[in-house]
Amino acid sequence: MKLKKRKIKFAAIFFLCWFGFMVLLVDGIIGFQSLVDYFGSYALVEITLLLLVALPTLAVYKFVKE
């Protein structure tokens, strides 16, 4: 699989924006500890948040046309 610079650039820009939004949302508005208290598992919240950032970034990389 050959990596394309344009696709990587768009995926990286999306990653930075989406990661920043998620940090603002989780740390600033909702509160990480509130999520842990609600779901009851630190690991579950961490994995879910990582997947919420990684999967859309991979999707952007896959669907950007060269």
Image (cartoon, rainbow, N blue to C red):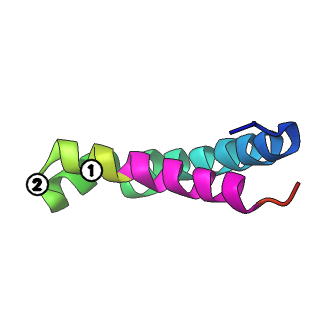
Segment colored magenta: 49-63
Q: Secondary structure at mark 1?
A: helix
The kind of secondary structure the magenta stretch mainly shows is: helix
Q: Within 10 Å of the Cα at label 1, are there few (<14), some (14-19), or many (20+) other Cα atoms?
A: some
Q: Is residue 38 magenta?
A: no
Q: Confirm or deny contact between disc 2 and disc 1 (CB under 8 A).
A: no
Q: x, y (%) of residue 38?
A: 17, 61
In the image: residue 26, left or right of residue 37: right
Q: Nearer the viewer, residue 64 or 52?
A: 64
Q: x, y (%) of residue 15?
A: 65, 45
Dot 1 amino acid type: Val
Q: x, y (%) of residue 6?
A: 87, 43
Q: Nearer the viewer, residue 46 or 38?
A: 46
Q: Within 10 Å of the Cα at label 2, are there few (<14), some (14-19), or many (20+) other Cα atoms?
A: few
Q: Nearer the viewer, residue 35 or 46?
A: 46
Looking at this rendering, what residue extends furthest in the left direction? 40
Residue ID for mark 1:
45
Quadrant for the C terminus, please: bottom right
| C-alpha separation, residue under disc 2 versus residue under disc 1 | 9 Å
In the image: residue 60, left or right of residue 37: right
Q: Secondary structure at mark 2?
A: loop
Q: Is residue 60 magenta?
A: yes
Residue positioned 75% across, 36% down in the render: 2
Residue positioned 58% across, 45% down in the render: 19
Q: x, y (%) of residue 58?
A: 59, 51
Residue ID for mark 2:
40
Residue positioned 79% across, 59% down in the render: 64
Q: Give the label on residue 56, or none.
A: none
Position of residue 8 relative to residue 45, above or below, is above
In the image: residue 58, left or right of residue 49: right
